[in-house]
Image (tube, coloured by chain):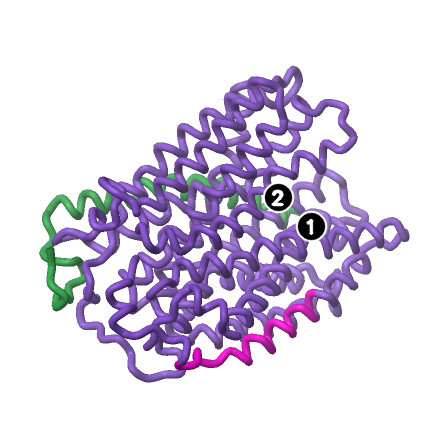
Chain colours: A green, B purple
């Protein structure tokens, strides 16, 4: 547990596996999001086709 | 109070916990519950399999979504205080259970051929999940990112906008795979789609409640000191009970309600609007494809507005941002009215900006609440404010559809069909602009005693 005086970006020193958890967590949400974004973007060219 | 694994005390961040793990935790909830915006994909399969030949199938299949949005506002308002008291893990577990439960009950309804179970499951139970899920990460994000509240809540609320982008193609593919659409479509195929989506969302959302943590009391980011100057520096804490007694809350309620209503004015009928403005003389297939492209572009603008404008609000201030959303928004509607279909480029730019302001309005409001009422019970206050969304969700489509239908009945064609709607939208935005101007710092009598706010502060 940290004290109120802790003023780091994280609550204390970062263990090595925190980086791994962070990467997995962001990929967990970004990969489906990128899939959805791709499905959206491929519809847009039709707007300018005519 | 929540106990065991769900207890708030168990979610206090241990040493080494990075605050950058909280946005993906929030996104895993918001990207899932944002599925609600993709409900329309289920409408045709449900009408064909559970309500064949029913002349009111169109209205009936919209019921689960409409009830869901109403329940979103009600659940956020009713459970907001509990969410703040029990912490984000409890809230995310409850939200996941209700949201996933909604899919499972809907699947059962399809297997049994009982449409009302879909309404109750997806609309009522799922809607409670939407409301609790929507507010569950907000106060936690604000406490982890006191230096960038707009950015942090913008990321989460962008996720809600982006949820439909994932759900829409996923639902279409599952329906096709299980025989829920096309010739020979069956209710069992639709039910299987609900079931599999429920399982997928249960797994996806679990990352949210596993990862979320609240910061230890007194924690603050490196090198950051709370601002002591500025009109809306967030120096005071106001309870949810007191917040709804302030004029600021109700002024902001009107601001949010009318900003959302104005956005829905275009969003609700995006495809027909494009067709009416630019469809004359073009091949039907090309117009349909172009209209779908227009809807996609608006969705993109809505999403980008959530993260972009909300982040900008950390630098320009919340009040100034709403001046833009409402004031510039009114001018953009006026521009569309005056230029009608003379320039597709001007039309596209104006409507994309309007939709970006719509998304920005949603995403900036938690930080605005934090500026006005502090972090003490910001989640509960946000929950109560979301009733404005429920009202706008009914008001916006009602205005636009009723007027458009009346114009169609009167044989009015082209852009003229929307003139009256757009004038009403401009009026609403001007009223919202005035309300935003009237928002001043909350009076001292509503402030909590500092010690009460500190000991009672929940994330």
Q: On the rendered structure, is B198 left or right of B412?
A: left
Considering the numbered disc 1 on the image, is that residue within a helix, a strand or a loop? loop
Q: Residue at x 76, y 41 (%)?
A: B283
B37 vs B392, nearest the viewer: B392
Q: Nearer the viewer, mark 1 or mark 2?
A: 2
- Magenta segment: B425-444
Q: Residue at x 25, y 46 (%)?
A: B7
The reply to whether discs 1 and 2 touch (Cβ–Cβ < 8 Å) is no
Marks 1, 2 in one chain: yes
B297 vs B151, nearest the viewer: B151
For residue B269, which numbered disc appears in the image?
A: 1
CA gap, disc 1 to disc 2? 16 Å
| Residue B452, position as x, y percentages in the image | 28, 69
Residue B278, placed above or below residue B176: below
**Around disc 2, counting alpha carbons within 10 Å, would you say few (fewer than 14), some (14 to 19), or many (20 or more)?**
many
User: Any magenta on residue B434?
Assistant: yes
For residue B45, which numbered disc appears in the image?
A: none
The number of numbered badges drawn on the structure is: 2
Identify the image quadrant of the C terminus of chain B: bottom left
For residue B66, which numbered disc appears in the image?
A: 2
Residue B138 appears anywhere in the view: yes
Picture quadrant where residue B215 is located: bottom left
| Residue A45, position as x, y percentages in the image | 58, 46
Picture quadrant where residue B63 is located: top right
Residue B213, placed above or below residue A39: below
Q: Residue at x 53, y 19 (%)?
A: B178
Q: On the rendered structure, is B44 left or right of B124?
A: right
């Amino acid at each position: 547990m940290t004290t109120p005086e802790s003023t780091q970006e994280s609550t204390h020193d970062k263990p090595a596996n925190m980086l791994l958890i962070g990467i997995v967590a962001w990929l967990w949400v970004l990969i489906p999001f990128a899939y959805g974004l791709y499905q959206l973007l491929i519809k847009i060219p039709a707007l300018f086709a005519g | 109070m929540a106990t065991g694994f769900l207890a708030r005390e168990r979610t206090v961040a241990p040493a080494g916990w990075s605050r950058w793990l909280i946005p993906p935790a929030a996104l895993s909830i918001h990207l899932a519950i944002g599925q609600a915006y993709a409900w329309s994909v289920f409408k045709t399969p449900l009408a064909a399999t559970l309500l064949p030949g029913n002349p009111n199938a169109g209205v009936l299949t919209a019921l689960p979504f409409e009830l869901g949005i109403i329940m979103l506002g009600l659940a956020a308002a009713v459970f907001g205080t509990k969410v703040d008291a029990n912490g984000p893990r409890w809230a995310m577990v409850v939200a996941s259970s209700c949201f996933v439960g909604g899919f499972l009950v809907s699947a059962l309804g399809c297997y049994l051929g009982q449409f009302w179970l879909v309404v109750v499951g997806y609309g009522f139970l799922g809607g409670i999940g939407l409301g609790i899920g929507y507010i569950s990460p907000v106060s936690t994000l604000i406490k982890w990112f006191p230096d960038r509240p707009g950015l942090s809540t913008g990321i989460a609320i962008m996720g809600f906008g982006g949820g439909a982008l994932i759900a829409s193609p996923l639902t279409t593919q599952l329906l096709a795979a299980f025989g829920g659409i096309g010739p020979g479509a069956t209710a069992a195929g639709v039910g299987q789609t609900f079931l599999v989506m429920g399982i997928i969302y249960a797994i996806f959302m679990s990352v949210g409640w596993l990862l979320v943590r609240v910061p230890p009391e007194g924690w603050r980011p490196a090198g950051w000191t709370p601002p002591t100057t500025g009109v809306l520096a967030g120096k005071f804490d106001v309870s949810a009970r007191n917040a709804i007694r302030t004029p600021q809350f109700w002024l902001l309620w009107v601001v949010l309600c009318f900003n959302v209503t104005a956005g829905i004015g275009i969003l609700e009928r995006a495809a027909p609007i494009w067709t009416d403005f630019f469809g004359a003389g073009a091949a039907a297939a090309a117009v349909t494809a172009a209209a779908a492209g227009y809807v996609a572009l608006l969705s993109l603008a809505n999403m980008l507005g959530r993260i972009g404008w909300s982040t900008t609000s950390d630098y320009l201030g919340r009040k100034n941002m709403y001046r833009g959303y409402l004031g510039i928004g009114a001018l953009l509607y006026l521009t569309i009215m005056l230029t009608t279909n003379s320039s597709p480029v001007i039309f596209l730019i104006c409507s994309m900006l309007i939709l970006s302001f719509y998304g920005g309005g949603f995403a900036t409001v938690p930080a605005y609440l934090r500026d006005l009422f502090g972090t003490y019970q910001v989640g509960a206050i946000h929950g109560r404010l979301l009733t404005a969304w429920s009202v706008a969700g009914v008001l916006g489509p009602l205005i636009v559809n009723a007027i458009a239908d009346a114009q169609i009945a009167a044989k009015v064609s082209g852009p003229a069909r929307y003139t009256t709607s757009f004038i009403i939208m401009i009026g609403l935005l001007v009223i919202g602009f005035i309300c935003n101007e009237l928002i001043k710092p909350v009076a001292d009598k509503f402030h909590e005693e500092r010690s009460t706010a500190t000991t009672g502060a929940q994330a």
